Image (tube, rainbow, N blue to C red):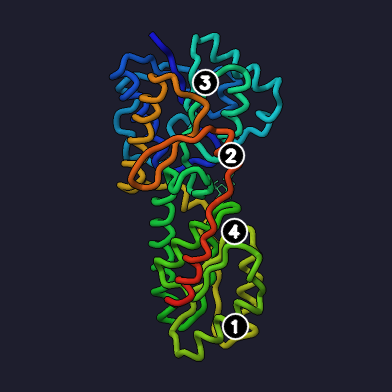
Amino acid sequence: MKRIAILTSGGDAPGMNAVIRAITRAGIALDLEVYGVRGGFKGLYDNEIFKLGRKSVSEKLNRGGTFLQSARFPEFMNDDVVKVAADNLRKHNIENIIVIGGDGSFKGAMSLSRFDIKVIGIPATIDNDIASTDFTVGFDTAVNTAVEAIDRIRDTSNSHKRCSIIEVMGRDCGDIALHSGVATGAEAIYVDGESFTYDSVCKVVEEAQANYKKHALIIIAENICNVIDLAEYVEKKTQYTTRSTILGHVQRGGTPSAFDRYLASNFGAYAIKLILEDTYNVALGTNGANLFYTPIKDAVEMKNNDKEYFFKAAELLK
Ligand code: F6P
């Protein structure tokens, strides 16, 4: 019986459990033996490999996080470490592994492929920063979490006629900021340093004031500035009392949205179909309607789509 392994890696994302469940259930239904790796690439290196049954994935579909656990493991860039991990899979007679994670995890999967392990990457990260798919598992849930939090901040901001500066996650990708900013009617959305200065934020806030707005909502992707300093600056320069909030890891947890559960379940079943067809070294993707795959080496090199149109539209709506 053919044996496959599943591993979750990098920052966890809501819906990872749903992917693991789908792979396990579809794999067993189609006569594969399914193994889980505990703790990402670090666990693979440490030979933390165990068999999964149908029951191992009961009650997991709606749970946030990853029950296989995840880890950041930069040591996996070293080929000696990758070889140990590949040999551990061979010791269990496993020739295929499905890696669930973001671009760093896909790079880890590619390293394994160089040691003759057949890999499939399933995109799962709240950042939505994998260009070979329009949606990653976890992104929709994270945006909904951010929107719920921002709506709450908006209520209190409005009552006190304040400016609220909110930092959202996304690493180098502005998709959480863009989507949550549009969905909450933000006065400004900043996703990179390009158009951003402290004074550009003050200008937006002053415009809001001139338009008799009861609040000003500014959404900023992480790694652009220190939002605590920015809030102090804006308060000094404008007449709005200003507060900053860093949403942080609250965006990574929680029960996955219906969209993420659906996507996760279908990615999982699709990965099994590809394994049975002996298709490998690919990353899965979706355009919302269809599933497809891209060679994983191309997936990690692709650049994200230009979102200029959506930023221009957001400007018109504020
Ligand atoms: O990749 C997911 C993510 O949450 C990013 O948005 C963020 O930059 C990073 O992980 C935080 O990583 P850590 O939890 O290791 O601090």
Residue named by callout 3: 118
Q: Residue at x 60, y 13 (%)?
A: 87
Mark 2 touches mark 4? (CB < 8 Å) = no
Q: Secondary structure at mark 2?
A: helix
Q: Is residue 112 left or right of residue 80?
A: left
Q: Is 61 rendered above or below residue 258?
A: above
Disc 2 residue type (three-letter): Val
Residue named by callout 2: 300
Disc 1 residue type (three-letter): Lys
Structural crowding at the residue carrying mark 3, measured as other residues with C-alpha within 10 Å and reported as few (<14), some (14–19) or many (≥20): many
Q: Secondary structure at mark 1?
A: helix
Disc 4 residue type (three-letter): Glu
Residue named by callout 1: 203
Task: Locate residue 157, reporting x and y percent.
Answer: 45, 77
Structural crowding at the residue carrying mark 1, measured as other residues with C-alpha within 10 Å and reported as few (<14), some (14–19) or many (≥20): some
Residue named by callout 4: 222
Disc 3 residue type (three-letter): Lys
Question: Label 4 vs label 1: CA separation?
Answer: 21 Å
Q: Secondary structure at mark 4?
A: loop
Question: Label 3 vs label 2: CA separation?
Answer: 17 Å
Cβ of disc 4 within 8 Å of ligand 1?
Answer: yes
Q: Is 138 rendered above or below residue 58?
A: below
Mark 1 and mark 3 lie on one chain; the one further toward the N terminus is 3
Mark 4 and mark 1 lie on one chain; the one further toward the N terminus is 1
Task: Locate residue 209, reporting x and y percent.
Answer: 51, 88
**Res. 38 mark:** none
